[in-house]
Image (spheres, helix red, strand yellow):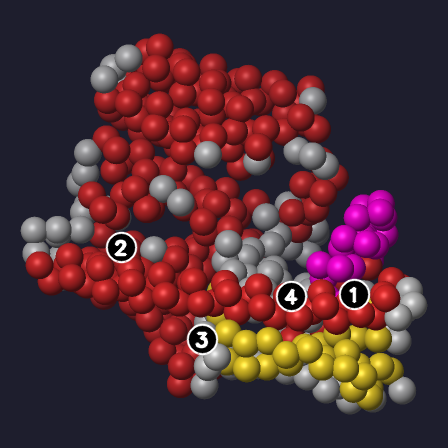
């Protein structure tokens, strides 16, 4: 909210050439840094724009940036709840084995992933762009995106991307999962031993993957159109946010919402609303996304209720917390939250086997103790959360 308010005040201040309103917007942008460290882009992005269109406002943004820099060097804990935890994100850039080819690869990955994920998250606004006049840039950008995506497909990795190893740059915990919204944190699915009970076929994965390429190409090709000040600020903010991701050793699809949320402001400004087909497409896709989102969230809550029912039944039966692997949430709530940072990271990365495991299905070497049913999508999806005991 602080970022959105800062964006609004800065835009109105620059558009009306009101220095006071612009300064207030910069103050709110400084406050947003206390909410999330990436709030600094709320200063950098407008600075880039005003440097070209309203140079007399440049000192205001430089002053706000200086305040953030001063706080960062004197009281870094004010901008980050845990500077050590924040430092773990960009630790990879200090590794001697992380060389220029690796840096280029990481940058390419993050930019491509962000285009794909933003294209999917904002699909109702991206789809109508197909009715704009075609340009050669769209084909060129699609080829660049497809080059990386096809390589991943050849390795057997389709959308939605998921970390197979903890060392990969994709961080576990995506919003998009296989035919649903997640993440499904029970260990049998979380560790990729089995798919989520309700999942797409391989053909469905390919369709989603190529759809993300088309959406990403449409998105990028049309973001370089000439627009007004509001459009320029929105694009600059998204571009700066995407560039800021390169400092992190991790990436998750939800990062696209944090880094490029302003795309949701830019897209409506270039959609050809005068065309009925564009309006109809936007409405149809929005309805489809709303239905998918609503039913998927209901299913997510349904299996979580079953998981907690299973967990509480074990606790009521006398099983200690340390004997139960109930997935990330119970472990984080009852154990990791009470550990120091090093202990927490070890516990997150290395999960020793436990007597009882809560899963989406039977596990090899375990006997089923109990089952807790759940359903989603108006009963079209029916499954069980299992309690299994190690033999």
Q: Please tell me whether mark 3 sits on a helix, a strand or a loop.
A: loop
Q: CA gap, disc 2 to disc 1?
A: 43 Å
Q: Are marks 3 and 1 in contact (CB under 8 Å)?
A: no
Residue position for label 2: 125
Q: Residue at x 41, y 33 (%)?
A: 4
Q: CA gap, disc 2 to disc 4?
A: 34 Å
- Of residue 79 and residue 190, the one placed in the foreground of this image is 190
Crowding around mark 4 (Cα neighbors within 10 Å: few <14, some 14 to 19, many 20+) is some
Image label count = 4
In magenta, the rendered stretch is 326-346
| Image x and y of residue 368, in percent | 78, 86
Residue position for label 1: 312
Q: Is residue 367 left or right of residue 236?
A: right
Residue position for label 3: 378
Q: Earlier along the polypeptide chain: callout 3 or callout 1? A: 1
| Image x and y of residue 196, in percent | 58, 78
Which quadrant of the structure image shows residue 54? top left
- Of residue 220 and residue 52, the one placed in the foreground of this image is 220
Q: CA gap, disc 3 to disc 4?
A: 16 Å
Q: Is residue 64 left or right of residue 132?
A: right
Crowding around mark 1 (Cα neighbors within 10 Å: few <14, some 14 to 19, many 20+) is some
Q: Earlier along the polypeptide chain: callout 2 or callout 1? A: 2
Between marks 2 and 3 in the image, the one whose residue lies nearer the viewer: 3
Magenta: main secondary structure: helix
Q: Are marks 1 and 4 in contact (CB under 8 Å)?
A: no
Between marks 2 and 1 in the image, the one whose residue lies nearer the viewer: 1
| Image x and y of residue 48, in percent | 35, 29
Q: Earlier along the polypeptide chain: callout 2 or callout 4? A: 2
Q: CA gap, disc 1 to disc 4?
A: 10 Å
Q: Please tell me whether mark 2 sits on a helix, a strand or a loop.
A: helix
**Residue 337 magenta-drawn?**
yes
Q: CA gap, disc 2 to disc 3?
A: 28 Å
């Amino acid at each position: 909210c602080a970022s959105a308010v800062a964006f609004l005040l800065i835009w109105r201040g620059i558009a009306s050439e009101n220095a006071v309103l612009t300064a207030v917007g910069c103050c709110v942008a400084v406050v947003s840094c206390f909410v999330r460290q990436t709030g600094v882009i709320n200063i950098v992005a407008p600075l880039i724009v005003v440097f070209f269109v309203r140079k007399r406002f440049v000192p205001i943004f430089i002053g706000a940036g200086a305040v953030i820099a001063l706080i960062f060097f004197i009281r870094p804990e004010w901008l980050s709840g845990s500077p050590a935890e924040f430092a773990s994100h960009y630790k990879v850039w200090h590794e001697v084995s992380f060389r220029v080819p690796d840096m280029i690869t990481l940058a390419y990955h993050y930019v491509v992933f962000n285009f794909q994920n933003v294209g999917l998250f904002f699909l109702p606004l991206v789809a109508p762009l197909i009715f704009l006049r075609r340009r050669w840039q769209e084909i060129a950008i699609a080829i660049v995106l497809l080059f990386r995506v096809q390589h991943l497909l050849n390795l057997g990795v389709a959308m939605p991307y998921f970390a197979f190893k903890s060392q990969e740059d994709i961080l576990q915990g995506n919003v998009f999962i296989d035919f649903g919204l997640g993440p499904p944190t029970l260990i049998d699915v979380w560790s990729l031993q089995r798919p989520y009970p309700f999942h797409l076929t391989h053909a469905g994965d390919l369709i989603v993957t190529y759809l993300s390429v088309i959406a990403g190409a449409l998105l990028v090709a049309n973001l370089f159109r000439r627009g007004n000040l509001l459009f320029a600020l929105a694009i600059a903010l998204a571009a700066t946010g995407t560039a800021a991701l390169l400092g992190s050793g991790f990436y998750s699809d939800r990062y696209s919402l944090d880094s490029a949320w302003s795309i949701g402001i830019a897209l409506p400004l270039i959609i050809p609303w005068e065309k009925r087909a564009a309006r109809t497409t936007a409405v149809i896709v929005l309805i489809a996304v709303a239905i998918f989102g609503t039913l998927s969230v209901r299913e997510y809550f349904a299996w979580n209720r079953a998981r907690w029912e299973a967990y509480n039944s074990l606790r009521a039966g006398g099983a200690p917390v340390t004997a139960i692997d109930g997935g990330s949430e119970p472990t984080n709530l009852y154990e990791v939250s009470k550990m120091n940072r090093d202990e927490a990271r070890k516990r997150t990365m290395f999960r020793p086997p436990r007597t009882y495991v809560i899963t989406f299905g039977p596990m090899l070497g375990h006997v089923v103790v109990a089952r807790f049913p759940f359903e989603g999508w108006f009963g079209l999806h029916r499954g069980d959360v299992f309690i299994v005991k190690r033999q």
